Image (tube, helix red, strand yellow):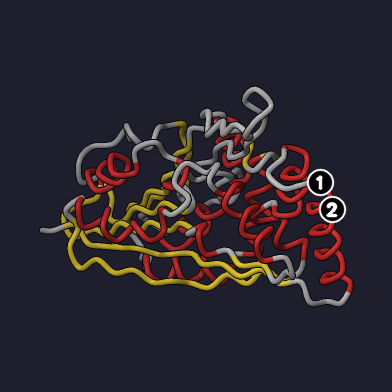
């Protein structure tokens, strides 16, 4: 599932206005969602392998991917549940569902896709052996309700795994610490739930899951291309100068510092994904 996560505009010439997330699921951080998901998948390959390992798909299982985006993860899972299993991906983004169906054509794996809201999954209680959601809950207006719905469609004994970044943990290596903190706080506060990562285990317990575990997975963005592909950081600095979050000269200096680090081969940005999972009681 994807969502608009940018800010813009001024209120009477004063502070930048947070437009929040209006529900337009065609873009993320100002970019087409499908292309963004492809780029992010490369950066998060290690995280995705760990999600796959912990979900432990097996032949014959029925699995659900909530907010499946372009369907790549569904197809990967479907290849693990053959011959008698089934994997379904749902997303509110109709274009993403179209892309996912196109990717699945001719693969021969038991995967299907449909448009659906995380708050009203069109499946019976206890239908799935496992449910996953990756980088979805951060964008939702009611995380607890969405997780409760994932738990509802999991069978007794089934697993629910939710993975999201904690946007309070991004750390680029730049000289002007005050300006860097200001940009990060402003940019990621335009995501509906920027600190959701640290809340996930509590939300899973509140939804009735047992044996809840959480693991922090480091994310190392090596170079500006990787950082921009996942977080849009360079664009955030530029827009911060345009919108008055930073003085224009200071924003330009921060942009120059990013370029200097990149030219030296030393630009790094660190972050974290939190993977939380639990079992539905028997």
Label 1 SS: helix
Label 2 SS: helix
Question: As rendered, which of 42 and 213 lies closer to the eye?
Answer: 213
Count all numbered tags in the image, as a single digit: 2
List the single residue furthest toward the left: 282
Residue at image position (27%, 55%) is 129
Q: Which mark is residue 248?
A: 1
- Image coordinates for residue 119, horizontal then vertical, percent: 33, 34
Q: Quadrant of residue 255?
A: bottom right
Real-space Cα separation, disc 2 to disc 1, in angstroms: 6 Å
- According to the image, label 2 marks what residue? 252
Q: Quadrant of the C terminus?
A: bottom left
Residue at image position (28%, 44%) is 144
- Image coordinates for residue 37, horizontal then vertical, percent: 62, 50
Vertical relation: 63 (above or below) 13: below
- Image coordinates for residue 253, horizontal then vertical, percent: 83, 58
Local packing at callout 2 (Cα closer than 10 Å; few below 14, some 14-19, many 20+) is: some
Q: Quadrant of residue 85?
A: bottom left
Labels 2 & 1 near each other (Cβ < 8 A): yes
Residue at image position (79%, 54%) is 250
- Image coordinates for residue 156, horizontal then vertical, percent: 16, 55
Vertical relation: 29 (above or below) 205: above
Residue at image position (56%, 30%) is 19
Vertical relation: 202 (above or below) 242: below
Local packing at callout 1 (Cα closer than 10 Å; few below 14, some 14-19, many 20+) is: some
Question: As rendered, which of 22 and 59 lies closer to the eye?
Answer: 22
């Amino acid at each position: 599932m994807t969502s608009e996560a940018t800010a813009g505009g001024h209120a009477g010439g004063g502070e930048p206005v947070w437009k929040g997330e209006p529900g337009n699921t065609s873009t993320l951080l100002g970019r087409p969602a499908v292309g963004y998901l492809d780029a992010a998948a490369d950066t998060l390959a290690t995280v995705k392998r760990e999600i796959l390992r912990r979900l432990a798909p097996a032949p014959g299982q029925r699995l659900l991917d909530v907010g499946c985006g372009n369907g790549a993860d569904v197809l990967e899972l479907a290849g693990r549940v053959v011959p008698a299993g089934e994997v379904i991906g749902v997303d509110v983004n109709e274009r993403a569902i179209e892309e996912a169906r196109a990717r699945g054509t001719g693969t021969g794996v038991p995967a299907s896709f449909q448009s659906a809201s995380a708050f009203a999954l069109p499946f019976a209680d206890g239908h799935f052996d496992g449910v996953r959601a990756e980088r979805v809950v951060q964008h939702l207006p009611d995380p607890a309700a969405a997780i409760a719905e994932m738990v509802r469609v999991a069978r007794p004994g089934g697993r629910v795994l939710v993975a999201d970044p904690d946007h309070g943990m991004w750390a680029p290596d730049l000289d002007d610490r005050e300006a860097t903190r200001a940009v990060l706080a402003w940019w990621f506060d335009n995501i509906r739930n920027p600190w959701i990562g640290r809340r996930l285990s509590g939300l899973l317990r509140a939804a009735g899951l047992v044996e809840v575990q959480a693991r922090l997975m480091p994310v190392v963005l090596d170079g500006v291309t990787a950082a921009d592909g996942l977080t849009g950081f360079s664009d955030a600095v530029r827009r911060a100068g345009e919108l008055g979050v930073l003085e224009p000269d200071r924003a330009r200096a921060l942009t120059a510092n990013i370029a200097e680090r990149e030219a030296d081969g030393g630009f790094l940005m660190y972050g974290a994904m939190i993977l939380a999972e639990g079992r539905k009681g028997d």
